[in-house]
Image (spheres, rainbow, N blue to C red):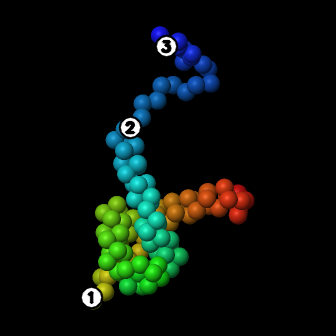
Amino acid sequence: MDKKICDGNHEHCPAKITPDYDRLYDLSEFFKVFGDSTRISIISVLHEGGEMCVCDIADTLGISQSAISHQLRILRTAALVKPRRDGKTIYYSLDDEHVSEIYEVGLQHILHKRGEIEL
């Protein structure tokens, strides 16, 4: 028999919260896209270098163009990067400022935990 440890009647506790599970699922799927080292490398390169074509991203990261194209397709589907066509060449950039902010905040957190920066 389970003993109930807490009756849930505490003044400091907020009112019952009902999570929006659909919204949380979408958020979880969004963050999964960031969970791949190749994709986060592409985001990093575009964050630092701005708009680039597939061949320049591939050269910068030392990864094949086909592998970069595959990951860019995933990033496009997740609305994290956007393409711009100029003749036969397609250039990619981060979709908007939110992507840069998410990348920067995540990186700041890692650097802070490593002791490389103070907040």
The amino acid type of the residue labelled 3 equals Asp
Asked if residue 106 lies left or right of residue 69, the reply is: right
Quarter that holds the C terminus = bottom right
Q: Residue at position x 36%, y 44% from top?
A: 25
The amino acid type of the residue labelled 1 equals Lys
**Is mark 2 in CB contact (under 8 Å) with mark 1?**
no
CA separation, marks 3 and 2? Answer: 29 Å
Q: Quadrant of residue 88?
A: bottom left
Q: Which residue is mark 3?
A: 2
Q: Which residue is mark 2?
A: 20
Q: Which residue is mark 1?
A: 88
Tell me the number on the disc at residue 25. none
Callout 1: SS = loop
Mark 3 and mark 2 lie on one chain; the one further toward the N terminus is 3
- Residue 96 image point, x, y percent: 43, 67
Q: Residue furthest left?
A: 88
Q: Residue at position x 43%, y 54% from top?
A: 31
Along the viewing direction, whichever of 36 and 13 lies nearer the viewer = 36
> Where 87 sits versus 97, above or below?
below
Mark 2 and mark 1 lie on one chain; the one further toward the N terminus is 2
Crowd class of label 1 (few under 14; some 14 to 19; many from 20; radius 10 Å): few
